[in-house]
Image (cartoon, helix red, strand yellow):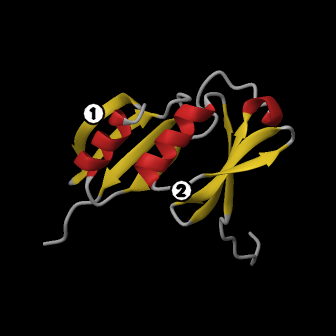
Amino acid sequence: MTNTNFTLVHITLAVTNMPAMKKFYDAVFGASLQALPMYETTLYQGKFAGISLLLCPNEIAQTKAEQNRHQLRFTVSDIQETMRLALANGATLLNDISEQGGAKIAAARDPDSNSIEFVQEAKSK
């Protein structure tokens, strides 16, 4: 184990369906993605859960995964509203809202079929 501290500051997602992914991450996560002309195409850059986010066309990233190039899990304050937003903006339902240990959990696939889990922690009494 090293004594180095790590802080995640940037994520690049390889994207197949750029218009749908931009719409989804803007609507669900408030990413405010802005066009970034580069490599004779357009990438999109914004913020995602306080972290720099870049959507990169898969033709450039050359990712060869058939699905789930990544899986993300977020805590949310309102899982019902989060799932409503996700499904209204191109996500597909993976697991409907259920309870586990007092927390509510659900999962959806973004427009490129990457799974995203949402967890609403149990409220303290």
Residue 55 is drawn in which quadrant?
top right
Residue at horizontal 60 percent and vertical 63 percent from the top: 51
Asked if one can make out residue 54 in the rendered structure from this viewpoint, the answer is no
Horizontal and vertical percent position of residue 25: 50, 46
Q: Is residue 57 left or right of residue 77?
A: right
Q: Residues within 10 Å of mark 1 (few under 14, many from 20)?
A: few
Q: Residues within 10 Å of mark 2 (few under 14, many from 20)?
A: some
The kind of residue tagged 1 is Asp
Residue at horizontal 60 percent and vertical 25 percent from the top: 67
| Quadrant into which the N terminus falls | bottom right
Nearer-N-terminus badge (1/2): 2
Residue at horizontal 23 percent and vertical 46 percent from the top: 80
Q: Is residue 58 left or right of residue 88?
A: right
Residue 117 is drawn in which quadrant?
top left
Check disc 2 and report the residue beneath it.
32
- The residue closer to the viewer here, 66 or 26, is 26
Check disc 1 and report the residue beneath it.
96
